[in-house]
Image (spheres, rainbow, N blue to C red):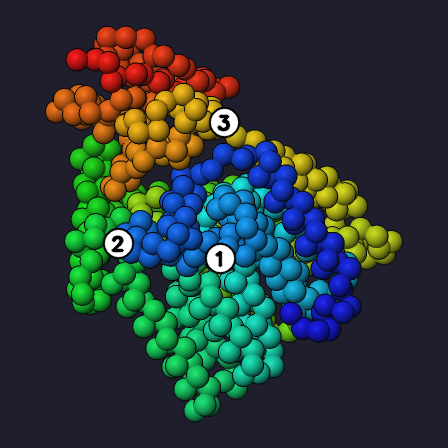
Amino acid sequence: MSPNFFYSNYRLVVLSAAVSLILSLWCVWADPVVNNDGVYYFRLAGEIYEGDWSSVTSLYVWPFYPMLISFVSAVTGLNIELSAHLLNAMLYVLLVIAFIAVIHELGGNRRTLLIASLIILSLPTLNKYRPYIIRDAGFLAFYMWSMLFLFRYWKTSSRASIVAWVACLLSAFLFRVEAAAFLVGTPILLASKTGLLTRSKWLLSLIIFVIAAILFSALVSWGFRHEAFLDAKDTTDSAVQGVLHAWDRIGEGIDKKIELLRDDFLQYSSKRYAWLVYVSSMIVVALAELVRGMSVVYALIVGYGMVKKVTFPTNRVYGLWLGVIGINVLVVIGFEIVMGFVVRRYMMALILTLMLLAPFILSSLYEDWRSKTNIVNPRWLFPATMALCAVVTIKGLDVFTDKHYLRDAGHWISANTPAESNLHSNNLILIYYSGKNAYRNDANYDWSRTTALFEDRSWRKYDYFAINISRKHPEKERWLRQRLLREPMKRFRSRKGDQVLIFKTNDLS
């Protein structure tokens, strides 16, 4: 953040930071039950806090985030869970300030900065993830700071800016792997700028590219097995072999999907278009998730601005903005190919990059609305747009979930069963709140693991069963009662009808 930005807008910065903290507090209060990923981070942070570094990579392949949680706990004296929420709240403050600073760097005036603050604080998808214990908050914060220094370097060619940009992306890489894509792709965008094709600038781009290539090699040999769901045995000492093996696994998965489309969905001569159907469906799903992530209102605002060719006051940065969007699109496509599906939170960097145009569009609409001459748009357009944004904001604050019954069931088990008793459960969140060491190394907690226990009769080694049953599959309760020949000793229900059944099994022969 430049001194000029802070001193001329410190009231807005401080107020935005305070509101961000209040929003984080509200979201955690409304949704206090930990998410599945959070359980892994809490476990690993606890191990680090206790000095057990041997399990750092065995539990999870991205240890930096839980290391930060452990550090916050050590400094503040708070428990691991509160420390994680405090860390996330501070990371979201960094993200909010960075978003406003980028708008300032792009030429935004005071009105545009105020609108930018309102947008980033009210973005529904971002607020939805505030109570989640996930690495994304750190990645998005440092990604947005990297955007600030990238735009500054584009305008000034300052070496300090490019060094800061690299530092921010390296920090983002410690949270999520896709930061490497920007380290690889952005030098190409920088080299395309007129005046950058000098020997020193090409050398700088080459250095950045080499750093990114080294990170990519480290990614393949260490972390790719997690992102692509590969087993530890699939990770070899050779990064090249790791890449080849990973792509073989990904290719096999894609071929199976294409084969299913060809054999079970398409008919006659249309079978030849299986690839086209597969690619088209992935594009449609990605676009639908993008619109949902932005909200329909903001998606229409940004789309309207691009059609109307609303640009940034700062000259010559629009093309760079489009280039960064292109890199984000490639990242999303890459994840969709690897995973076979798209996760909305993996689109957040793309969403935030697109949303950089929104404050300038709304500011332009406001200027047109207040003008009494040369009105381009209907006078109702701006107030109607703001009314829709207000509705989206209010709706986005409803982050209440229906997971409390899982926490309640876990707490009941902790309070009403012997500490040394063995528990089997098909729900990770419940296990966490139970305090039992009922975790499994393969992270497989689905229903099939429960049925497998009865097939090999290994269920007898457990003292208690705590099974989460969806309202959509009531037959699973009948199946359990038939196998155990008894009613559950305790039952916890959600508002929607999902339930946890707790059975005592240590008295069964």
Point 67% across, 73% down: residue: 2
Point 16% across, 25% down: residue: 458
- Local secondary structure at mark 3: helix
Point 63% across, 39% down: residue: 26
Separation of marks 3 and 1 at Cα, in angstroms: 29 Å
User: Where does label 2 land, which residue?
Assistant: 225
In the rendered structure, find residue 71 and report the number of the disc placed on it. Answer: 1
In the rendered structure, find residue 210 and report the number of the disc placed on it. Answer: none
Q: Nearer the viewer, residue 436 or 246?
A: 436
**Label located before the other in sequence (3 or 2):** 2
The residue lying furthest to the right in this view is: 372
The residue lying furthest to the bottom in this view is: 199
Q: Is 397 located above or below residue 90 in the figure?
A: above
**Label located before the other in sequence (2 or 1):** 1
Residue 335 in the image: state x and y as whole percent: 35, 52
- Local secondary structure at mark 2: helix
Amino acid residing under circle 3? His
Amino acid residing under circle 2? Arg
Left or right, 251 with reference to 213: left
Amino acid residing under circle 1? Phe
Separation of marks 3 and 2 at Cα, in angstroms: 32 Å
Q: Nearer the viewer, residue 490 or 506?
A: 506
Residue 39 in the image: state x and y as whole percent: 40, 41
User: Where does label 3 land, which residue?
Assistant: 404
Q: Is 476 located above or below residue 190 in the figure?
A: above
Could you tell me which quadrant the N terminus lies in?
Answer: bottom right
- Local secondary structure at mark 1: helix
